[in-house]
Amino acid sequence: VQLQASGGGLVQAGGSLRLSCAASGRIAIINTMGWYRQAPGKKRELVASVSSSYSTNYAESVKGRFTISRDDAKNTVTLQMNSLKPEDTAVYYCGANMLAYYPGSPVLPSDPDDYWGQGTQVTVSS
């Protein structure tokens, strides 16, 4: 089971970027999916999340600028980032709470677990 993130890059302030993350593997259930970020010298923070019922949650700093969405048919979560600011510069990580089969086994764990994708760098120049 893995999460594969893509879409980071360098953009000028005011620009837009779109991050995507795809979950793959022997997954039974995907609960909440989200995007987190970590700037140098700072703790990882939640940027946005979307539940299995499509309820969304955003950090105050990105409300009105970022939009999170998910496609359950493709097991993907997307973060559309508009009006980017230099303070949005960070490594962005996708995360998902999922119930996945044990490797090589038809058995499921009793509880879901948190999975993380590799980070993708977002740099916003002023």
Image: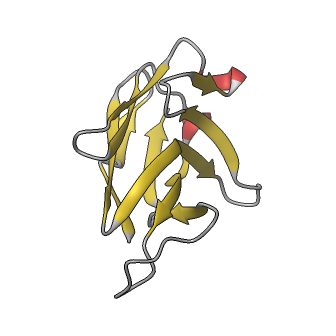
Q: How many marks?
A: 0
Which residue occupies the foreground of this view, 51 or 125?
51
| 13 relative position to 78: left or right | right
Q: Residue furthest front?
A: 106
Q: Residue furthest top?
A: 64
- Residue at image location 59% in from the left, 47% down from the top: 36
Residue 48 position in % (x across, y down): 57, 33
| 115 relative position to 58: left or right | left
- Residue at image location 68% in from the left, 28% down from the top: 59
Quadrant (top left, top right, bottom left, bottom right) of the N terminus: bottom left
Q: Residue furthest left?
A: 74
Which residue occupies the foreground of this view, 30 or 109?
109
Residue 81 position in % (x across, y down): 42, 28
Which residue occupies the foreground of this view, 92 or 76?
76
Residue 104 position in % (x across, y down): 34, 88
Q: Quadrant of residue 20?
A: top left
- Residue at image location 54% in from the left, 33% down from the top: 51
| 14 relative position to 23: left or right | right
Query: Compared to 45, does 117 lie above or below?
Result: below
Residue 118 position in % (x across, y down): 44, 67
Q: How is the protein colored in the picture?
A: secondary structure
Q: Quadrant of residue 110?
A: bottom right
- Residue at image location 77% in from the left, 56% down from the top: 43
